[in-house]
Image (cartoon, rainbow, N blue to C red):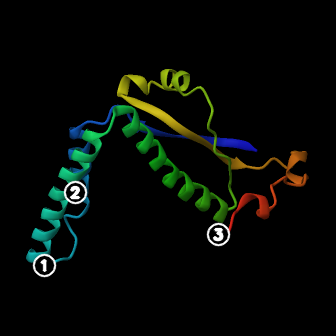
């Protein structure tokens, strides 16, 4: 595959209450022009405030490493959407874990911005010269992979 782009999925480390506030502000801004009545708008505003309190309480009560691990797992939701979209558009993608994230973080200047890389995913087009694309894929049989109870 010729990777035209390599996307890094990153998380804030450590997450702070002001990060939740920033997200709530983005939500308010995005929903400014929603077509809803005043009563519904007040309900929405109250729900956003409640969400903010819940998020701050939840993330604030976690050990910082646990909070970071939770946020890293959230990256996989976005990764799944990226890969499904790529597949639909016939663009190849291949997720990577196990890379030296601290080194990439330093090289990309992520550390200075309180960010850390969770997973990376090159995207691009398969080279017609890649002989591996024609090889049989090796997968465990479903009987060994899944258990029915």
Residue at (85% x, 54% y) in the render: 137
Label 3, label 1: how far apart the Cα atoms are: 49 Å
Q: Earlier in the sequence, mark 1 or mark 2?
A: 1
In the image, residue 130 lies at what x, y percent? 86, 45
Q: Is residue 33 left or right of residue 87?
A: left
The residue positioned 64% from the left and 69% from the top of the image is 149
| Badge 3: residue crowd in 10 Å (few <14, some 14–19, many ≥20) | few
Q: Residue 68, percent across and down?
A: 40, 37
Mark 1 vs mark 2, CA separation in Å: 21 Å
Q: Position of residue 147 (x, y in %)?
A: 69, 64
Q: Nearer the viewer, mark 2 or mark 3?
A: 3
- Which residue is rendered at x = 26% and y = 40% of the image? 61
The residue wearing badge 2 is 51
Please indicate whether residue 94 sits to the left or right of residue 34 in the image.
Answer: right
53 left or right of 99 in image: left
- Whole-percent x and y of residue 43? 13, 70
Up the image or down, 141 lies above or below 67; here it is below
Residue 37's tag is 1
Residue at far front of view: 149
144 with respect to 72 (left or right) = right
Disc 2 is placed on an element classified as: helix
Residue reaching furthest to the bottom: 37
Q: Which residue is mark 3?
A: 149
The first of marks 3 and 1 along the sequence is 1
Q: How packed is label 2: few (under 14 Cα within 10 Å), some, or many (20 or more)?
A: some
Residue 50: image quadrant is bottom left
**Precedes in sequence: disc 2 or disc 3:** 2
Q: Residue visible at 61% across and 37% down?
A: 97
Disc 2 to disc 3: CB gap under 8 Å: no
Q: Nearer the viewer, residue 69 or 123?
A: 69
Mark 1–mark 2 CB contact (< 8 Å): no
């Amino acid at each position: 595959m010729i990777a035209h782009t390599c996307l890094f999925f990153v998380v804030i480390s450590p997450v702070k209450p002001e990060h939740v506030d920033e997200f709530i502000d983005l939500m308010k801004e995005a929903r400014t022009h929603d077509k809803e009545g005043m009563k519904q708008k007040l309900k929405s505003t109250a729900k956003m405030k409640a969400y903010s309190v819940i998020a701050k309480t939840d993330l604030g009560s976690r050990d910082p490493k646990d909070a970071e691990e939770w946020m890293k797992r959230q990256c996989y939701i976005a990764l799944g959407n990226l890969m499904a979209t790529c597949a639909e558009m016939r663009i190849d993608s291949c997720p990577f874990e196990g890379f030296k994230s601290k080194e990439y973080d330093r090289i990309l200047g992520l550390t200075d911005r309180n960010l850390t890389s969770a997973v990376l995913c090159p995207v691009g087009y398969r080279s017609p010269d890649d002989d591996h694309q024609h090889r049989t894929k090796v997968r465990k049989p479903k009987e060994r992979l899944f258990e029915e109870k």
